[in-house]
Amino acid sequence: MDTVVRCSNKHLLALPRGLPRNVTELYLDGNQFTSVPTELATFKFLQLVDLSNNKISSLSDDSFSNMSQLTTLILSYNSLHCIPPLALGGLRSLRLLSLHGNDISELQQGIFSDVASLSHLAIGANPLYCDCRLLWLSDWVKSGYKEPGIARCAGPGGMEGKLLLTTPADKFQCLGPVEASVRAKCSPCVASPCQNQGVCQVNETELYTCTCKSGFTGKHCETPVDACVSNPCTNAGLCISDEQTQGFSCACAFGFHGTFCEVNVDDCEDHGCESDATCVDGVGNYTCVCPPNYTGLFCEELEDVCSPGWVGPNCSIDYNECVDHRCQNGAQCVDHLDGYSCVCPQGFSGEFCEAAALPPPSLCQLSACQNGAPCVQEAGVVVCECLPGFEGDRCQKLVSVNFVDRDSYVQLQDVKNWPQANITLQVSTAEDNGILLYNGDNEPIAVELHQGHVRVTYDPGNQPATTIYSTETVNDGLFHTVELVTFNRMLNLSVDGGEPTTLDSQEGRIPRGAGDAPLYVGGMPEAVLDSSHRLSSQTLNTSSFHGCIKNLYINHELQDFTRSRMNPGVEPGCQPCRKLLCLHGVCQPHAEQGPQCHCQPGWTGPLCDQPITADLTAAETVTMATGVNPCEGSKCVKGVCVAVDAQTYRCDCEEGFTGESCDIETLCRGEPVRDVHRLQRGLVLCQTSKPFSWVDCRGRCQAGSMTAAHSCCAPLRVRRRRLTFECDDGTSFTQDVEKPVECGCKECV
């Protein structure tokens, strides 16, 4: 059996199973190990172990126990910053040790006491701190030239760049306190990494752990706990979180007090009952129980022996209640026995004719349909009929756009941490080339349409730009789903859920984030073209995309194009030009006669697919081709018919409906949302300092229920939070904000 095992560049996180027990050489370089596998100690015949180019950040005192036959140990290009004093214990046969390319600043004297056979030490490309405590290492490498003269000092002041091997011993001096960043590598608690008064404790496997105070959580105790999660307020009290103190307070309902609103206020302590009446406490009020012969709210009146409405010594006078009437707006007072009524003039109503009689507002007048969406009232339910491209219960989001001009594009400015995550979009076009996405930061990346395929070009900054292509073509006029996923040093591209194409940049780095550079969709402005020249080795096509893009998700968040900057030539929605494939031209969706192809010079025909010949006259125009419409007689109940080809069609359903014929209602549900909350204060725009979570209520209430005709999908429970707002004029303030946390069917308002 072969005793040499090579598992290089396999993206391993753990030691693979089935290794021969007598293995002598084990190559594990270029993987994803974050620590030395503990199982290595069971392979007692190992003579060489290569763990270079991994993510190992720490060693323990028993990382290499029982490896007495090991002669070569390679730990170069990891993230080591401290070597424990006993980490190399027992390696009596070790002759070559490579720690090159780590983050080591100090080595404790005596660390090589067990490795008497060590003759070659590679410790270059480490920020060595060459004060008097590292003099022993300089003397040690000079005895026998165990280090080839590569390792250089990074500090303290005056020692930068000096060779460990040749620098005289009198230069290794301790002249002041050691920098905290150096001491923290082997004593991580020196840097006080725990926030909010958390207690730092050294840990062998994780370097350190933070024991958090009550009210905080997270690795560094950086996340406050929402104190209102347990609903501590009783008797309908409202819990209010306080982000500054990480505590809470209860806003009690009227009639209750106490920390948790648990105490009913005794309103009889200061009652106004008279005539020895008995006070009965209520919630926020009290009642006086009068003794015999007394009446009134406070039992302050002696009962009149006359019947109601009669006065006088003999109770024979009918009292005129209109003497003290309260009728308004010229109303006529009519006296009755023990009362009166007001006869209102035309245009007024109410007990005292105090209200002008106005027709009640319709439900649509109270609705909040956005972006020009018409409001329709169906069986007591308000529905916003969204214009093409818009979605949401109020048509508040623009999720699909049509690029109809050659220089059109959309600019997304507030997209953060792109593209270190998951990007998904749906594309419909008949073009061969065009920009889909472009970000021109320090490490530019472009997703483009190239000869009908999807091409991703990426410049890692330290090597020529690299490119991957989709095997599928996407320029057939139908919608195709393009997904781009980045993970560490890998980038995957897949189309319509097919087999992904992978870009594995071992030497480079997958982009770390967009920084301040915007993300361009469908094209880019001329001013950005210069930055795209870094990708010119791949002949980047800088022409704008022509077609439709919808459902752009970044990190599983649906992008709302109303919050972006759209260049002229970008139209909401995809419907007008979906069926019209202009081969050598641009589809214009808002022409008077419907969508038309505007051809490029030299082309004509309904689809811009016919070259112009000499006998064509200037009076000839381009019109949309006519023919059999497969949508005639379609059965899209709650949706729009879209022709797929000359014989078939499909139904694009309205929000709240699904099914082949859009005849199945989607039940009311809460769609999770995580975003910032925005406020307009005069001319100043303010938003919360950090995002928070709530739900958007979407869907319809189930047909057939007793209340369905008068029920709407609406919040059933809301939560109030006190949030900090930051404004673009530099000011800030705190304010309570209510957001829904549970949705359901309730009476429409």
Image (cartoon, grey):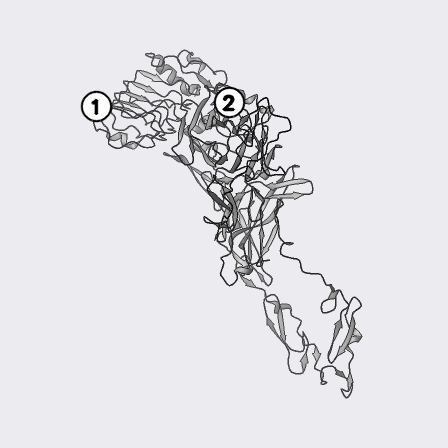
Image spot of residue 627 (x, y percent): 52, 39
In-image side of 603 versus 490 (left or right): right
Give amino acid for label 1: Asp
Element assignment for label 1: loop
Which badge, 1 or 2, is on the more N-terminal residue?
1
Count of numbered labels shown in the rendering: 2
The quadrant of the picture occupied by the C terminus is bottom right
Real-space CA distance between mark 1 and mark 2, rounded to the nearest whole angstrom: 48 Å
The residue lying furthest to the front in this view is: 615
Image spot of residue 433 (x, y percent): 51, 26
**448 relative to 381, above or below:** above
The residue lying furthest to the left in this view is: 1
Which residue is more in the foreground, 171 or 218? Answer: 218
**168 relative to 66, above or below:** above
Residue 665 visible? The answer is: no
> Would you name the residue on which mark 1 appears?
2
> Would you name the residue on which mark 2 appears?
540
Image spot of residue 114 (x, y percent): 28, 23
Q: Residue at x 75, y 65 (%)?
A: 348
Image spot of residue 510 (x, y percent): 45, 27
Which residue is more in the foreground, 617 or 421? Answer: 617
Residue 6 visible? The answer is: yes
